[in-house]
Image: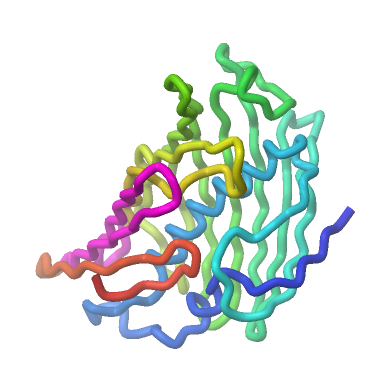
Amino acid sequence: MRLIVWTMLAGMALVFSGCRLLSSDLFDAKDGNAGLVATEVVSMGEAVGELWDEGGMAKSRSSAAETVYVDIEIQPWAYDNAAKCWTRSSRAQFDNGDRVREDTVWLFGPAGDTVKTPSFSTVSSYRHVRSVHAEADNAFDNRLDMNVDIRVQGDDTLFVKNGTITGHYNGTQYSTTTITDLTRQWHRGRVPHLAFPSSGTVAIDRPLRTIDVEFEGDGEGSGTATATATRKRDGKTTVYVINVERGTESDA
């Protein structure tokens, strides 16, 4: 079954449009790389939130602020009995290209055994692998591999994510990209269920610079993602803010 959604996609056209592409060694360039990585990391949480809704059969939705009309085709979550995992794919078509996401999620119980049904009573962690291929004025071809612990602390349920990203942005290979202790609070009574990350970092290592993204949030719906870029040849730094819904970057 396919679900066709007409919507205005989360500002990704701005990220892929190429309007900000500058020389890779021009220090203050905001080429959309950090914004796109941060947006994918956060949106993976929303995708798993939909998996928890009615075992993956809830209506798919977009949780981000939108800017341009695009055609989005989303396959509902489906369970692969042989591989013991949940899978889903989606495709967004822009005026100048498209983006394809392939999601795979393995659910684990406290003993590390695989679990089929998404439930807090049986699932204590999961692994989420997302492959993203986007071709427009900017090209993004990456594999995000995340391990997420589900921690129940009193009335609070926290999702704590750690993982790596491999691939390239506009043909430039990442050296290493890591996600460390990205923490989000789960809210059962609202959609989206996962709040803005309350803490955690994303570290991007590119040939000419490093980019460190730090998340800070109130555990509800508000927060910031601040990027610090450091040029390797002279150590010069600049700081800017990422809108993780739109994927845009702006001066701090």
Percent coordinates x, y for residue 199 in the rendering: 33, 43
- Residue 137 forms part of the magenta stretch: no
The quadrant of the image that shows the C terminus is bottom left
Percent coordinates x, y for residue 229 in the rendering: 23, 65
Observer-nearest residue: 202 or 243?
243
Judged by its main secondary structure, the magenta piece is strand
| x 73%, y 43%: residue | 87
Percent coordinates x, y for residue 130 in the rendering: 59, 49
Q: Report whether 146 appears left or right of 134.
A: left
Q: Report whether 19 appears left or right of 80.
A: left
252 to 55, vertically: above or below: below
| x 66%, y 42%: residue | 104
> Residue 5 lies in what quarter of the image?
bottom right
Magenta region: which residues?
205-232
Observer-nearest residue: 233 or 199?
199
- Residue 207 forms part of the magenta stretch: yes
Furthest residue toward top: 111
| x 54%, y 26%: residue | 125
